[in-house]
Image: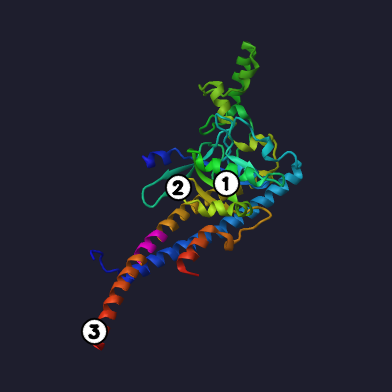
Amino acid sequence: MAQAAHKDRTLIAAIGDEDTITGLLLAGIGDIDAHQRPNFLVVDTKTTHDTIEEEFTSFTQRKDIAIILINQHIADELRGILDEYSAAFPTVLEIPSKDHPYDPSKDSVLKRVQLILGD
Amino acid sequence: MSESTPNPALIDGQLLALFDCVAEYQQLRSSSSNLLRQAFFDLALAKRSAGYQWISPDLYSGRASAIATVSIDEEYPISMRVVRNSSRINNDGEKDQDGDAENADGGLRRRRRHSDHKAEYAEANSSGDEDEENMPNDSEKPDKEKRSAAVTDPLLWFGMLVPPTLKSAQSGFVSSLDQFIQLAQLKHRLVQQQQALQKVVAASTVKHSQSGAENLGSVQGAQQ
């Protein structure tokens, strides 16, 4: 059953800049599985778009991840993929970073509400 | 048509529920952003005092497992909550000041009496095994299990004597994470509300177009 499958989803994955990942690791989300796959990706200036996209896709395909936290400015680079992503789990949530505060106009959840209300 | 007439009050009700949900979402967004901003500030202070190379994800262990996980309950509405596997970090993110890794046993820690220390010291001397000196008297757990419990606090990866600002940063990130989980839950609720509203509006549109066509037919009949 789908419900039983979702019960196995317990991890919180994160894609973000160094400070965001450090903080989330301090909060205790960090996990490295038996295949040495971490559930987080530190994005810096050297990280390519392909790496981010590949990692995001692998997180969405993993059966043990319930939530993917992604910095809003990094999510902007994956906007096309995020707009198409409609699965309930893993839930993708955009979060602010140190250098890029939360911008409601870029929030995909609020954008969807605006679309429904016809604004 | 077998579909029942959509009630305008039903649409209003769905719309109000959606607006309530959006308001709650925005409030939680603002609150989590403020918490996160303070946590980033504390982290920056900690980095400044401890050294920029000492606090980074590179120091995280390759054998670590998550201590903050999510439990999903898929009964309508979907609910999610954070489950913390470590007893060493309470809700405020405070860690006990005695950083002795050998004393963490996963439950409530009992402060040892002076007589216990003396007895242990005598025992250690008699056996000649120095490792047993630090073992608590009342514990019967294997050493390996205790060690795995001891490494659960991520703060320990950054050293034993971490700056107080790093502890407050941890506290801020723990609280932020709780709010992120609530936001993810709210996102699910919003999607469900939107789907419900779309259903009601679609039914209403069909009914309106049907009644509009009937009205048009009757007007045309009257004109003829």
In-front residue for pair B139/A50: A50
Judging from the image, what secondary structure is the residue with disc 3 in? helix
* Up-down relation of residue A81 to residue B2 (above or below): above
Determine crowd level at label 3: few under 14, some 14-19, many 20+ residues with C-alpha closer than 10 A.
few
In the rendered image, which residue does mark 2 sit on?
Answer: B80
* N-term mark: 3 or 1: 1
Q: Is residue B199 magenta?
A: yes
Q: Residue furthest bottom?
A: B223
Chain letter of mark 1 equals B
Q: Nearer the viewer, mark 2 or mark 1?
A: 2
Determine crowd level at label 2: few under 14, some 14-19, many 20+ residues with C-alpha closer than 10 A.
some
In the rendered image, which residue does mark 1 sit on?
Answer: B174
Q: What segment is highlighted magenta in the picture?
A: B194-200
Return the x and y of residue A12 as percentages of the image width and height: 53, 43
Return the x and y of residue B143 as percentages of the image width and height: 56, 21
Q: Quadrant of residue A101?
A: bottom right
Q: Are marks 2 and 3 in contact (CB under 8 Å)?
A: no
In-front residue for pair B110/B190: B190
- Check chain identity for marks 2 and 3: say if they share one: yes
Residue at (69, 35) in percent of width and height: B159
